């Protein structure tokens, strides 16, 4: 069983792999045939690390069985997994080949009584925002500081009893000097809210410089 060392980083630099070869050589499939998915780490069994993948919306989950050991990852933590299926068998349990596993921001939805206008909301560059089951997932770019920052999804407590709950991406550099933009992945568990009978829509507000005219994004139950 191979040991895969988990990368303890929150902000992910782009990985550029340059492969030199001539027309006679085969390129390693790890560079050409793979998937990138945000998945949940379920722990280890006697074969290796186990993950859970859920597709967009309310798609069924698929258990991903690997043959690697992942270090420094807590059970139920969300990670960015680079992998490929070991076979073409369609099932709710698949064997996979793991090429990389990286830490991301993995958190649950929080709530605040504070006014939304008072929340620190440093700008991001949105790449994608999507829901998989009970998770709101985010791929964006943030300004690099090399220091810890605050990055979380917060619900306005005054809207929790409404059918539309307003949530804000809180992003605080804590006074640190910012430099270049860098990729960031995050996944927020919103299951406690999503299961409420009165809930109908989760509205996410971002301070986004990529699409500044889009004030919010709605996820409807």
Image: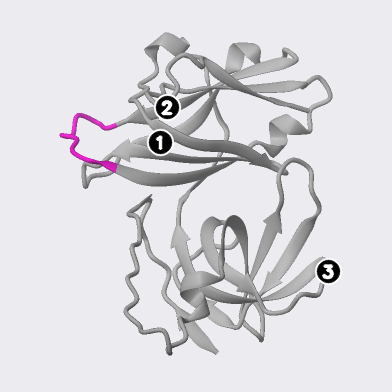
> Which residue is at the front of the view, 35 or 64?
35
Residue for point 42% across, 27% down: 170
Measured as percent of width and height from the top left, residue 192 is found at: 71, 35
Measured in 3D between alpha carbons, the distance from the residue under mark 2 to the one under mark 1, in whole angstroms, is 6 Å
Kindly indicate the quadrant of the structure image that contains residue 83.
bottom right
Q: Earlier in the sequence, mark 1 or mark 3?
A: 3
Tell me, yes or no, whether the two marked residues, 2 and 3, touch with CB atoms within 8 Å. Answer: no
Q: Is residue 19 above or below residue 1?
A: above
Q: Is residue 144 above or below residue 32?
A: above
Q: Earlier in the sequence, mark 2 or mark 1?
A: 1
Tell me, yes or no, whether the two marked residues, 1 and 3, touch with CB atoms within 8 Å. Answer: no
Q: Quadrant of the N terminus?
A: bottom right
Residue for point 77% across, 56% down: 61
Q: Is residue 179 magenta?
A: yes
Residue for point 47% across, 86% down: 26
Measured in 3D between alpha carbons, the distance from the residue under mark 1 to the one under mark 3, in whole angstroms, is 36 Å
């Amino acid at each position: 069983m191979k040991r895969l060392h988990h990368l303890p980083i929150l902000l992910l630099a782009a990985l550029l792999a340059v492969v030199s070869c001539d027309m006679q050589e085969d390129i390693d499939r790890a560079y050409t045939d793979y998937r990138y998915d945000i998945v949940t780490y379920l722990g280890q069994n006697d074969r290796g690390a186990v993950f859970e993948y859920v597709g967009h919306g309310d798609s069924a989950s698929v258990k991903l069985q690997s043959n690697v050991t992942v270090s420094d990852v807590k059970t139920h933590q969300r990670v960015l997994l680079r992998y490929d299926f070991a076979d073409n068998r369609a099932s709710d349990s698949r064997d996979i080949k793991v090429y990389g596993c990286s830490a991301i921001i993995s958190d649950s939805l929080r709530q605040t009584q504070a006014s939304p206008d008072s929340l620190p909301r440093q700008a991001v560059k949105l790449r994608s925002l999507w829901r998989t089951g009970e998770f709101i997932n985010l791929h964006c770019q943030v300004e690099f500081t090399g220091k810890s920052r605050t990055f979380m999804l917060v619900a306005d407590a005054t809207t929790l009893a409404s059918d539309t709950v307003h949530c804000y991406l809180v992003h605080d550099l804590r006074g640190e000097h910012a430099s270049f933009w860098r990729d960031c992945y995050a996944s927020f568990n919103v299951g406690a809210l999503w299961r409420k009978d009165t809930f109908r829509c989760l509205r996410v507000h971002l301070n986004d410089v990529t699409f500044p005219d889009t004030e919010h994004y709605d996820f409807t139950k």
